[in-house]
Image: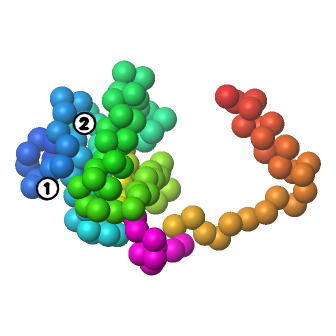
Amino acid sequence: MACVFCAIVAGDVAADIVLDTPDLLAFLDTRPVFKGHALLIPRRHVATLPDLPDDLALPFLAAARRLASAMVDGLGAQGSFVCQNNVVSQSVPHLHLHVLPRTKGDGMRGFLWPRLRYDSPQEQAEYAARLRSVL
C-alpha cells in the first residue's frame, strides 16, 4: 500500500499546507482533535522517530517549535499539545508529529491516561537503570 503522506509530498493527494520547507511539510489533519491540528512530516519517507536521520532532527524540532508557537500566535490558543507515536497507534507508517492548539477547559482528556504507579522505589530505579543501560 502506498504511503498517503508521501502522496501528499508528491502533490498527488491534496492537503492544506501550513509549513513548506525543502525537507519538511506540515498540513492540517483531516480529522482534527481541534481546529488547527497540524501534522509535521519529513518529506522523505521515514517510518518512525528513531529512524529520523540526524541531519533532519534539528530542522524537525525547529519546525515543531514554530508550529507550537503558531497555535498561539495564529489561532489565539493559550498553548499547544505536541505528540507523536512510533508504530503503536501510528495510523500512517510515516513519521508525523501532531501539533494541536490548546485552551484551558477545551475538553481534551484521556490522551495520556490511565497513569500507573511503580510498585516501589526499587522498581522505579530498575526501570531507570534499564533505560540508562541502552542509552
Q: Residue at x 20, y 43 (%)?
A: 19
Q: Position of residue 92 (x, y in %)?
A: 33, 54
Quarter-wise, where is residue 36 in the image?
A: bottom left
For badge 2, the amino acid type reads: Leu
Q: Residue at x 40, y 68 (%)?
A: 103
**Can see residue 91?**
no
Residue placed under numbered mark 2 in the picture: 24
**Can see residue 126?**
yes
> From which residue to which does the magenta span run?
102-110
Q: Position of residue 86 (x, y in %)?
A: 48, 48
Query: Looking at the image, is 64 positioned above or below residue 80?
Result: above
Count of marks overlaid on the render: 2
* 7 vs 127, nearest the viewer: 127
Q: Residue at x 72, y 37 (%)?
A: 131
* 110 vs 2, nearest the viewer: 110
Q: Secondary structure at mark 1?
A: loop
Numbered badge on residue 115: none
Question: Is 108 included in the stretch rendered in magenta?
Answer: yes
**How are the colours assigned in the image?**
rainbow
Q: Residue at x 21, y 52 (%)?
A: 27
Query: Looking at the image, is 32 positioned above or below residue 107?
Result: above
Q: Residues within 10 Å of mark 1 (few under 14, many from 20)?
A: few
Residue placed under numbered mark 1 in the picture: 16
Q: Earlier in the sequence, mark 1 or mark 2?
A: 1
What is the spatial separation of the Cα atoms under label 1 and label 2, in whole angstroms? 14 Å
Query: Looking at the image, is 120 positioned above or below residue 46?
Result: below
For badge 1, the amino acid type reads: Asp
Q: Secondary structure at mark 2?
A: strand
Quarter-wise, where is residue 91 in the image?
A: bottom left
Q: Position of residue 18 (x, y in %)?
A: 18, 49
Horizontal side, residue 41 vs residue 13: left or right: right
Horizontal side, residue 25 vs residue 107: left or right: left
